[in-house]
């Protein structure tokens, strides 16, 4: 993320978004939800643990998935960023999508 807030911290700055940390609350408020992933043309279960809110700062960033009105998965060129823990699910479709970028 170009910007990280709540609190501010340094980041790699590789994608033109703002990450607002802990948007969904503390770890005790973690949850799992089914989300539709546009480029996969299907849904998968996503684990949200101390998840950030993603705010897109550029039209070059593509929104790939949302949870309600919140953006939770984005892509800019060959960089993906998500609010959820992709590595915790058993579904590998999003990993495969990333490998084929």
Image: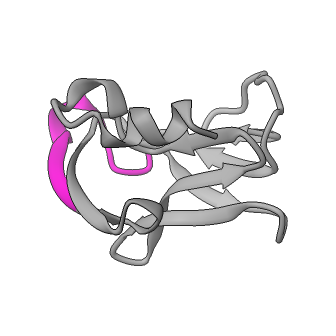
Q: Nearer the viewer, residue 49 or 15?
A: 15
Q: Is residue 5 visible?
A: no
The x and y percentages for residue 16 are: 81, 50
Q: Residue at x 78, y 47 (%)?
A: 77
Q: Nearer the viewer, residue 1 or 44?
A: 44
Q: Is residue 28 visible?
A: yes
Q: Is residue 56 magenta?
A: no
Q: Is residue 75 above or below residue 51?
A: below
Q: Is residue 65 left or right of residue 90?
A: right
Q: Residue furthest bottom?
A: 69
Q: What range of the chain is rendered magenta?
A: 23-34
Q: Nearer the viewer, residue 37 or 18?
A: 37
Q: How is the image coloured?
A: one colour
Q: Residue at x 59, y 66 (%)?
A: 63
The x and y percentages for residue 42 are: 27, 65
Q: Is residue 87 above or below residue 82?
A: above
Q: How many marks?
A: 0
Task: Name which quarter of the figure residue 59 lies in.
Answer: bottom right
Q: Nearer the viewer, residue 59 or 57?
A: 59
Q: Residue furthest front?
A: 100
The x and y percentages for residue 13 are: 83, 32
Q: Residue at x 74, y 51 (%)?
A: 17
Q: Is residue 9 above or below residue 98?
A: above
Q: Is residue 47 left or right of residue 38?
A: left
Quarter of the image for the N terminus: give it. Answer: top right
Q: Residue at x 73, y 25 (%)?
A: 9
Quarter of the image for the C terminus: give it. Answer: top right
């Amino acid at each position: 993320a170009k910007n990280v807030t709540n609190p501010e911290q340094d980041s790699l700055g590789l994608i033109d978004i703002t990450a607002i940390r802990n948007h969904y609350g503390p770890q005790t408020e973690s949850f799992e939800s089914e989300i539709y992933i546009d480029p996969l043309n299907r849904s998968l279960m996503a684990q949200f643990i101390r998840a950030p809110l993603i705010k897109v700062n550029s039209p070059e960033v593509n929104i790939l998935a949302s949870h309600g009105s919140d953006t939770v998965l984005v892509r800019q060129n060959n960089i993906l960023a998500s609010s959820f823990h992709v590595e915790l699910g058993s579904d590998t479709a999003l990993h495969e999508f990333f490998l084929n970028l």
